[in-house]
């Protein structure tokens, strides 16, 4: 006789009873066996369910132990607290960084009282409000007082963690100790402040020294003019009155005096111009570029004709600018003068071009003269830098330095594109300042 053993609708076994006689089991025995099989099925199923429940409880307990261990051993401060202010767990890092024993931090109120002093009540209320969170939140930087009285800077993070069996909401709060970083930032700010103060002080000293040097240069150049005029004048007078009495050697020496005094006079004039640029107060006004170039064309016409030079000027309509007319005109005049001076073997050609763009205006002076090697193209804008002796090309080495200083005052720049024997193109770049 056999009866099935079931788990739900699934047959998992059978209960079998054997007898030697064919008619050993009646209906009563069959019913009893069937009932016994059902009872055994229920008992086995209950045992299995209990075993599974016990295993789940053990797994849950092990998971809770792992969570608690991870929380306790976390390398940063971590606190698990519940609605109502109870602290359920605190990491050892929280205790070691603050100096408070774990059993001293059994509630949010106990922590706030120790860490925040007079602000304890306010901070306690804020911490207890964290149970309302629905997603993780990064809190503000807080100053936390340790057991030794030291103030530490902590950055807090909090996140909701479900509910306890009694329905209270859980919050996991962690913190990062940023004290050292904050101290480094404060030290960096202090050093930056000191550096800025030193820069301001040294800048002021440099400006004073530069201003004094300009005043000295202007004063010396101005004061040298009178005696130089006297030397030049008496040398001319000597040449007119005593020409017949002077020997050939004397006349040669007198000519050297006149040439040197003339060269010195040009140098003094250029020095005064350079000093005036530094002392110049920029006055921007509307100027018609076409009118300025017309004036320069008339000014250099005789010089160009005398040297056999062809000078081409812009033939397109030119804009009205807002700039300092004195500085711009002087800069253009310097560049045109250089183009007519440093000529090569070919017939001198000079072109003045104007190009407008979204960032400003470019005024270019091109020539087909001797050109400039690339290694010298930066140096030529320094004062007193000359690539040729005065016996080859006249000049004082101050003109391009004045141009550079003028462009700096106007907020622009000057550069050159050149190669030996291929001429030069000097470009004045002015920022866009339209009326």
Image: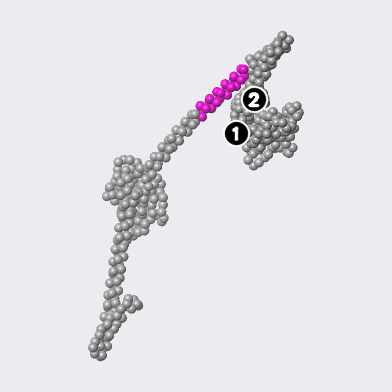
Going 37% across and 47% down the picture, which residue do you hit? 176
**Spot occupied by residue 91 in the image (x, y as percentages of width and height):** 32, 51
Rate crowding at label 2 as few (under 14), some (14 to 19) or many (20 or more) other CA atoms within 10 Å.
few
Question: Could you say which is closer to the camera, residue 160 or residue 243?
Answer: 243
Q: Which residue is mark 2?
A: 389
Q: Which residues are magenta?
A: 203-224
Going 62% across and 27% down the picture, which residue do you hit? 386
Please tell me whether residue 323 is drawn above or below residue 209 in the rendered image: below
**Spot occupied by residue 391 in the image (x, y as percentages of width and height):** 67, 23
The numbered dot on residue 151 is none
Going 66% across and 16% down the picture, which residue do you hit? 257
Query: Magenta stretch: residue 400 in it?
Result: no
Residue 426 in sight in this render: no
Residue 305 in sight in this render: yes
Is label 2 in a helix, a strand or a loop?
loop
Kindly indicate the quadrant of the structure image that contains residue 35: bottom left
């Amino acid at each position: 006789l056999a009866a099935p053993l079931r788990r739900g609708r699934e047959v998992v076994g059978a209960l079998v009873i054997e007898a030697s006689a064919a008619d050993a089991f009646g209906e009563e025995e069959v019913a009893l066996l069937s009932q016994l099989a059902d009872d055994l099925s229920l008992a086995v199923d209950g045992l299995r369910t209990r075993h599974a429940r016990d295993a789940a409880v053990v797994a849950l307990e092990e998971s809770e132990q792992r969570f608690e261990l991870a929380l306790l051993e976390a390398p940063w401060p971590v606190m698990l607290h519940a609605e109502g202010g109870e602290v359920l767990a605190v990491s050892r890092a929280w205790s070691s960084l603050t100096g408070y024993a774990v059993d001293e931090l059994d509630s949010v109120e106990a922590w706030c009282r120790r860490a925040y002093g007079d602000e304890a009540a306010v901070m306690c209320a804020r911490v207890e409000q964290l149970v309302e969170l629905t997603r993780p939140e990064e809190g503000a930087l807080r100053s936390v007082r340790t057991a030794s009285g030291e103030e530490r800077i902590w950055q807090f993070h909090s996140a909701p963690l479900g509910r306890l069996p009694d329905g209270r909401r859980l919050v996991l709060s962690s913190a990062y100790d940023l004290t050292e970083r904050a101290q480094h930032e404060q030290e960096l700010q202090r050093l930056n402040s000191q550096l800025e103060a030193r820069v301001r002080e040294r800048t002021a000293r440099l400006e004073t020294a530069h201003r004094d040097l300009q005043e000295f240069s202007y004063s010396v150049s101005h004061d040298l003019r009178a005696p130089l005029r006297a030397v030049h004048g008496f040398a001319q007078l000597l040449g007119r009155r005593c020409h017949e009495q002077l020997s050939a050697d004397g006349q040669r020496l007198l000519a050297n005096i006149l040439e040197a005094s003339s060269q010195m006079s040009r140098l003094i004039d250029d020095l005064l111009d350079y000093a005036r640029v530094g002392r110049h107060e920029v006055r921007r006004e509307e100027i018609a570029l076409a009118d300025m170039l017309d004036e320069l064309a008339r000014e250099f016409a005789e010089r160009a004709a005398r040297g056999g030079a062809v000078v081409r000027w812009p033939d397109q309509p030119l804009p009205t600018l807002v700039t300092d007319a004195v500085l711009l005109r002087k800069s253009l005049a310097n560049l045109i003068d250089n183009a007519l001076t440093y000529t090569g073997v070919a017939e001198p050609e000079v072109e003045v071009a104007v190009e407008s763009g979204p960032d400003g205006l470019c005024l270019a002076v091109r020539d087909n003269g001797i050109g400039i090697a690339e290694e010298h193209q930066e140096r030529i804008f320094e004062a007193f830098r000359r690539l040729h002796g005065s016996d080859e090309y006249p000049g004082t080495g101050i003109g391009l330095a004045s141009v550079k200083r003028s462009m700096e005052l106007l907020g622009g720049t000057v550069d050159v594109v050149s190669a030996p024997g291929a001429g030069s193109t000097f470009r004045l770049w002015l920022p866009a300042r339209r009326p």
